[in-house]
Amino acid sequence: MTVTTEPTLEPTDAEIDAAILRAIDQTGEELVPWATIRQQVPGTFWRKAGAFGRLWCDGRIFAIKIGGRNYVARGDEADALRAARDKAAGRVRGVRCL
């Protein structure tokens, strides 16, 4: 008896990044709870956390903790400038919320 299984395709990093940004945009809100976004995005917890870090370091998202809850928003020009300045200086700004 031969058992064939369909391979499950894991999303790429770019797909996870795009899904996070799309989920933020679809809410129409300025700040969105990260837990809400995380539930809508494909991939494992750690892949989503890695995407969060990438997007933060690139200045594509803004993150803040309010009342013990993590919130995200689309990054703006200031976030992009901060990211470029940090990269030029060889620094990686730490992410304090996940």
Image (cartoon, rainbow, N blue to C red):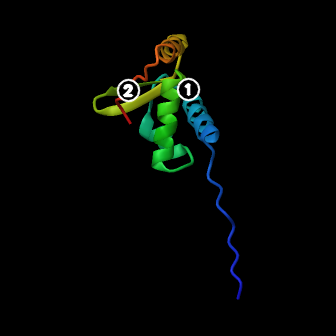
Is residue 24 positioned above or below 78 on the image? below
| Residue 26, quarter of the rendered image | top right
**What is the number of callouts on the image?**
2
Q: Give residue 93's position: percent from left, percent from top.
A: 40, 22
Image quarter hosting the C terminus: top left
Residue found at the very far left of the displayed protein: 67
Instruction: Give me the C-alpha separation between circle 2 and circle 1.
Output: 27 Å
Residue assigned mark 2 = 94
Other residues around mark 2 within 10 Å, as few (<14) / some (14–19) / many (≥20) = few
Is residue 20 positioned above or below 62 on the image? below
Residue assigned mark 1 = 28
Return the disc, 2 or 1, that comes first in the chain's sequence. Answer: 1
Q: Single out the mark in the foreground, 2 or 1.
A: 2
Mark 2 residue type: Gly
**Secondary structure state at the residue bearing disc 2:** loop
Left or right placement of residue 73 versus residue 11 in this view: left
For the residue pair 93 and 89, the one nearer the viewer reads as 89
Q: Give residue 57's position: percent from left, percent from top.
A: 49, 25
Q: Residue at x 61, y 33 (%)?
A: 22
Is residue 34 positioned above or below 60 on the image? below
Q: Residue at x 33, y 33 (%)?
A: 69
